[in-house]
Image (cartoon, rainbow, N blue to C red):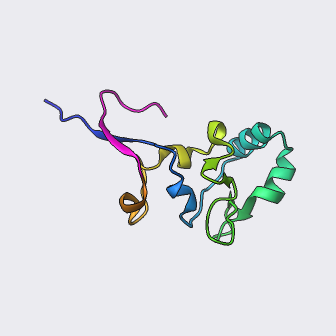
Amino acid sequence: MDTPEIRYQCQRCGACCRWPGEVVLSDAEIRAMAAHLGQSEHAFIQTRTALRRTRSGLTLAQKADGSCTLLDGGDCIVHEAKPAQCRAFPNTWRFPGWRQLCEATPERATEPPAE
């Protein structure tokens, strides 16, 4: 008999959005976020992204404190169109110390998550 996997349900606390790091973006994600904000892709890239440290693509830009440029107070302004990396936290990736900051609630998964 399989043991049900523990999955975490996001409580939208914003802790992961305040943690410095790279959120790698695909072209499709850039298009979706730009459309969600009513911006051109060019304007979105110029104002909301940065070149990755490896110079191998774009990441979401960060504010001076390390938080995401798309975080407004405690809310993600593109929540409905946020990148896959953001949607996957904390179930498929985590940063060191995430549990001390994140308010996600553990639940037993009955089915595989929809990606």
- Asked whether residue 108 is drawn in magenta, I would say yes
Q: Is residue 54 above or below residue 25?
A: below
User: Picture quarter containing residue 95?
Assistant: bottom left
Residue 104 highlighted magenta (yes or no): yes
Q: How many marks?
A: 0
Residue at screen point 83% across, 39% down: 38
Where residue 92 appears, as percent x and y from the top left, is 41, 48
Q: Is residue 29 left or right of residue 91?
A: right
Q: Nearer the viewer, residue 29 or 95?
A: 95
Depth check: give the residue in front, 91 or 107.
107
From the viewer's perspective, is 114 left or right of 41? left
Q: Is 12 placed above or below 58 here?
A: above
Residue at 76%, 41% in the rendered image: 31
Magenta segment boundaries in residue numbering: 103-115
Q: Quadrant of residue 53?
A: bottom right
Q: Position of residue 110 (x, y in %)?
A: 30, 27
Residue placed farthest to the front in the image? 73
> Between residues 50 and 63, which one lies in front from this camera angle?
63
Q: Residue at the location (62% across, 63% down)? A: 67
The N terminus is located in which quarter? top left
x and y, in percent, of residue 61 in the image? 70, 62
Q: Main secondary structure of the magenta part?
A: loop
Occupied quadrant, residue 56: bottom right
Residue 54 location (% of width, % of height):
63, 70
Residue positioned 27% across, 38% down in the render: 5
